[in-house]
Image (tube, rainbow, N blue to C red):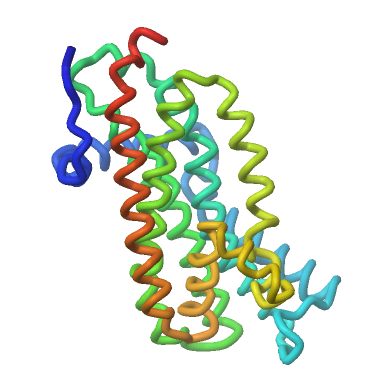
Amino acid sequence: MRNFSASPSEMISSLWRNRELIKASAKREVLGRYRGSVMGILWSFFNPLLMLAVYTIVFSVVFQARWGSGSSSKTEFALVLFAGLMMFNLFAECINRSPSLILSNVNYVKKVVFPLEILPAVTLISALFHTLISLAVWFLAYGFFFGVPHVTALLLPLVVIPFLMLIMGLSWCLASLGVYLRDVSQIISVVTSVLMFMSPVFYPASALPENYRYILYLNPMSPVIEMTRDVLYWGKIPNSQVLSVYCLSTAFIAWLGFAWFQKTRKGFADVL
């Protein structure tokens, strides 16, 4: 039986070695989502635009919500909310699909030459494409209401790259678990719903009492949501210490997920 390397170097080299296959598969997945529709891929632009308009009307007009006691902008809440929601939606889309990645590609399992480890990367790139469209909508809205975005927005990749490593690590782990435990999909759908309200998506972390705030930061979604808002809307540079710890932690999680996937993939064909 073939042995699959679980080293960190193999994790990186495998993704690089199969980059063209990942690119082609992600492109096919993005285009396949809108195949047969009249507007096609334009839906990926209009969907976030519509959602941003809904958030603006509901939260700033109907509920008169404000992000902090000192805020008076009617659109601030919607833009701050949307910035955090973009990150959460990226996470949720990948994590919810991960348990069924191998199950929905059984034909690839039988092919020894096919690199199964790239399947989470394909899903991630597909989800990232829609996140980038949402980000473009966010910048258009910010530019319309407030003018030129903060220069700190250029630091967004520093915030997102560790987050992508977290998603990949969890996706590898869940993709493997989904083969052996079919209930994982149902469990994860419930967990992601709970995480939405346990993450600072609809409220700032400062809204929680200080005694309970540490619980919020045990959630790996919290740092990236807060830092995304800092660089995009508030014009703040992310805390270097928090970012460094987050980067190291997510890199370790990525490797653990990859190692688990490589060690357990030998049994995929037998189970399926």
Q: On the picture, is 239 further left or further right than 114?
A: right
Q: Is residue 173 above or below residue 179?
A: below
Write the residue at 47% across / 56% down. 131
Q: Position of residue 13 (x, y in %)?
A: 15, 43
Q: Position of residue 104 (x, y in %)?
A: 44, 21
Write the residue at 79% across / 76% down. 65
Q: Position of residue 183 (x, y in %)?
A: 59, 23
Q: Residue furthest right?
A: 62
Quarter of the image where the C terminus is located: top left
Quarter of the image where the N terminus is located: top left
Relative to the observer, which residue lies in front, 60 or 243? 243
Q: Position of residue 244 (x, y in %)?
A: 34, 70
Relative to the observer, which residue lies in front, 63 or 257? 257
Q: Is residue 222 above or below residue 4?
A: below
Q: On the picture, is 130 further left or further right than 265?
A: right
Total label count?
A: 0
Q: Is residue 60 above or below residue 53?
A: below
Q: Residue furthest front?
A: 211
Write the residue at 48% across / 25% down. 178
Write the residue at 38% across / 36% down. 172
Q: Quadrant of residue 67?
A: bottom right
